[in-house]
Amino acid sequence: MSQPIYLDYAATTPVEPAVAERMAGYLTADGTFANPASRSHLYGWFAEEAVEQARGQVAELIGADPREIVWTSGATEADNLALKGVARALRHHGRHIVTCTTEHKAVVDPCQWLEDEGFEITWLEPNPDGSLPPERVRSVLREDTLLVSLMHANNETGVIHDIDALGRVCREAGVLFHVDAAQSLGKLPIDVSALPVDLMSLSAHKIYGPKGVGALYVRRSPQVRLEPQIHGGGHERGLRSGTLAPHQVVGMGEALALAGERMDEDYRHVEKLRDQLREKLSVLDDIHVHGESAPRLPGHLNVAFAGVDGEMLLTALNRVAVSSGSACTSATVEPSYVLRAMGVSDALAHSSVRFSVGRLTTLTDIEAAGDHICEVVQRLRAVPA
Ligand SMILES: *Cc1c(COP(=O)(O)O)cnc(C)c1O
């Protein structure tokens, strides 16, 4: 049997071959293998030069100054550094933090941890379409609010938050604004020189770069105070110690430069295919596309197939590689908390599937996937419950 069609680009993407090729030049003895922190020899200087060039590429894509980019191991670490770093640095000024129930676990879990540490978290609820009106944020801000943390685009539904409007509410109140942009980076234009955003989490592997590298954008003016979470050597201006991995950061820089060049082309390609898949599924009755009426990323399609058992659906959809609306925790299968927060019932959340298309998806893939999905859903619905 042939391999399933990969429709899980929101989980991760393959590394672009040109990016992998460049990365390979930073590993072996005939390449630039040195420690970029080695200041005493030519080897180190070359590695440092490569790291700084990549930092410039990341900064360039989001309109930042290279000095505002802190390398991390990914968006999870960047989220942790932003949330815990601000909370720790400003704990004498207040203890209140605002976020939303549809955030990624990389924000939800650190917020819960901070709650245990004595911080007070306000968990905002989105509208049923996943959107979040700025007034809802404004209404919960207080004298002692330190930080608002909201994602740019949701990983499960693709729903896009208006970070400009949300950020302005924070600015007016003198509250810091952190944005998790792991899903939108390289897919939507982002310009922090014009946006009221103080901190932004970035990741390489959702945009055809390597897994295991990301960055945190930290505004310099007005400067954001941040307490480091990893100590040992004072790398990254003291904010994140640890020897940098030149092959990883070079890979991220290269992937982002490429994403910048191809942004319009990528957008049109995935939007067209996503809409074609949506069209193919419209022969089915009783389907619901989560967040369909809100602005969404072009490659996401999160669909509920009413009346179909979630587990049976996932098992039967063996010709496509997709993500389900359920998450396997230690013992049980839990419905997606993101869909639940949007008011979707447990049953409908369990019957939901996230399809996400990408650069390598073809029209042939979409046609075969669409036929397969329709056939499976119709077959499962024909079985008497
Ligand atoms: C993937 C993702 C993360 C985690 O990023 P890593 O680089 O894998 O740690 C965080 N937030 C969102 C919205 C994501 O999609």
Image: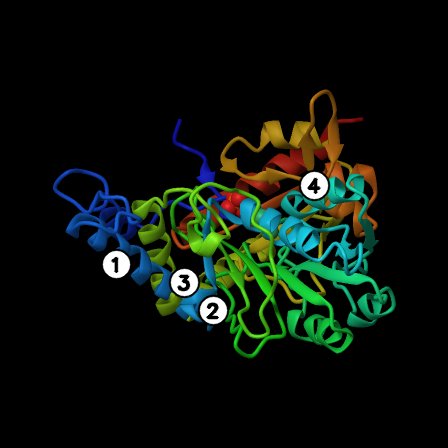
Q: Which residue is mark 4?
A: 109
Rendered position, 242 above or below 207: above
- The residue under the point 21% across, 50% down is 40
Q: Are marks 1 and 4 in contact (CB under 8 Å)?
A: no
Q: Which mark is residue 287?
A: none
Q: Which residue is mark 2?
A: 62
- The residue under the point 34% across, 44% down is 245
Total numbered badges shown on the rendered structure: 4
Which of labels 3 and 1 is toward the front? 1
The CA span between labels 2 and 4 is: 26 Å
- Where is residue 125, by image quadrant? bottom right
Q: Which residue is mark 3?
A: 58
The CA span between labels 3 and 4 is: 27 Å
Q: Are marks 3 and 2 in contact (CB under 8 Å)?
A: yes
The CA span between labels 1 and 4 is: 36 Å
What's the residue type where badge 2 is placed?
A: Ile
Q: Earlier in the sequence, mark 3 or mark 1?
A: 1
